[in-house]
Amino acid sequence: MENEKQFVLWDTILHYMELAIDIIKKTERPGSQYAGTILKYLKDIHTAKKEHKPLIMINFCFPPEIIYAMDCYPMNQELGSISLSFANAGLKYIDIAEEHGIDQFQCNAQKVWIGASMLGEAPYPDYIIYGSQPCDSTNAQYQVLNQIYSEAPVYTVDIPYWHHDPSNKFYNPHTLPYVAQQLKNLVTWLEERIDRKMDHNRFITTIQNSNQARQLTLDTMELMRAKPAPLPSMAAFNLFGIQLISGGLPEPIGFVKYIRDMAKERVKKKQGALEARGLEEKHRVMWVYLPIFFEPLLFDWLERKFGAVVVMDMMGYATSQIINMKNDETIFEGLAAQVLDTPMGRQSRGPAEYYIDDLLRIGKDYAADCAIYGGHIGCKHSHAIAILMKEIIEEELGIPCLIFEVDCVDSRPISSREIKRKLKLFFQSLE
């Protein structure tokens, strides 16, 4: 399917990202370096096509290091779907998908791409690789994508239910080696289809780059515990996002180091991110679920209006440790741990305790004084425990928890105005 129409969705994201960079630069906030890395990633798809590098569609539960090590392009499907929501540009694709039978309550993080694919406006992958987490909606809709891209071979990483950490009560000793073996098999699977062996030196360099960025991220996460918070809301999510698309490349290292050093300097001065902008930190928010993607300035509004900084959100809660470089066996085990510890996948693939235990840990470690759960309509698994989660947070952490329903990608079911009304009432109740 070689035609320019297939890049309509991707180039629309590219256009809005260029506009976003211009806006961010005027605010003098650190987001421009982040947006610049994303911009390069988006542009690289055209370079990859010109150089005849395979385009490999991955989901956000599969890290890109192996793809980069194979000298291929990792086309992150959820990035493509979610990024359009910043400007409400993905609504027509949602409608197209639903008109063709995709249920309205299925997650829009895949539905946008499905609709665009039905119109021939999304890039056609050479291969599809995805981890079977965090939810049934993801697995169901990837089957639809598999049918749309019927000529693209598919490799599914089967994610076990049980935990890989020996200290967890749901630990199973087979979990980590089971996933690690699948990743080894994936390399062989790709080598056979691409007709090219993985360059081992390139593989090692990729993991070394990933480790550098990951260690800097872990350092930054530790600094975010400080009072007042040294970084603004969305900082943790942005660090996750940069690894999601560029993990293994050298570019994220400079960005994450810049953020780490900024946080370190502010902690040393006992200066918060809000104070640096002439604001006062009044509330430390634990954002229990996804950011509301169609309202990218919502967290900025919370900071300005209520002095509320999101000290940690679920999608930014990075727990993956650096990979042991002793040998290939430890490297693949480390990559497997990253797959299993992917934010959202880590919390949602198994028992409710995975989710709740992380929230209690975040609340304590980051000294949150309130929690907010904007429950994404497509995430039915999280709605099943929403009330239980609220009760446990309020009882064990002793902090208030707001819960409300929202579609994080589509602004039509619950508008920005309604969301802000709920948030305003909540913060007024805390005064």
Image: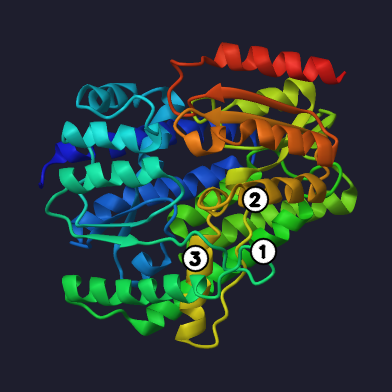
> The residue under label 1 is which amino acid type?
Lys
Please give the residue where the numbered disc 1 appears in the rendered image: 169
Choose mark 2 or mark 3, whichever is in front.
2
Q: Nearer the viewer, mark 1 or mark 3?
A: 1
Q: Are marks 1 and 2 in contact (CB under 8 Å)?
A: yes
Task: Choose between 30 and 417: the one closer to the eye.
Answer: 417
Q: In screen coordinates, is 41 left or right of 322?
A: left
- x and y, in percent, of residue 217 in the image: 64, 59
Q: Secondary structure at mark 1?
A: loop
Q: Residue at x 82, y 41 (%)?
A: 396
Please indicate, yes or no, whether residue 285 appears anywhere in the rendered image.
Answer: no
Q: Quickly name the residue at label 3.
A: 250
Mark 1 vs 3, N-terminal side: 1
- Assign a secondary structure to mark 3: loop
Residue carrying label 2 = 353
At label 3, the amino acid type is: Pro
Secondary structure beneath label 2: helix
Q: Residues within 10 Å of mark 2 (few under 14, many from 20)?
A: some
13 vs 49: above or below: above
Q: Which mark is residue 124?
A: none
Q: Are marks 2 and 3 in contact (CB under 8 Å)?
A: no
Amino acid type at mark 2: Glu
Q: Quadrant of residue 228?
A: top right
In this orientation, does residue 204 appear?
A: yes
- Give the residue at x 65% y 44%: 235
- Quarter of the image holding residue 314? top right
x and y, in percent, of residue 150 in the image: 13, 50
Distance from disc 1 to disc 3, alpha carbons, whole Å, reads 37 Å
Q: Earlier in the sequence, mark 2 or mark 3?
A: 3
The CA distance from mark 2 to mark 3 is 36 Å
Which residue occupies 80% across, 43% down? 229
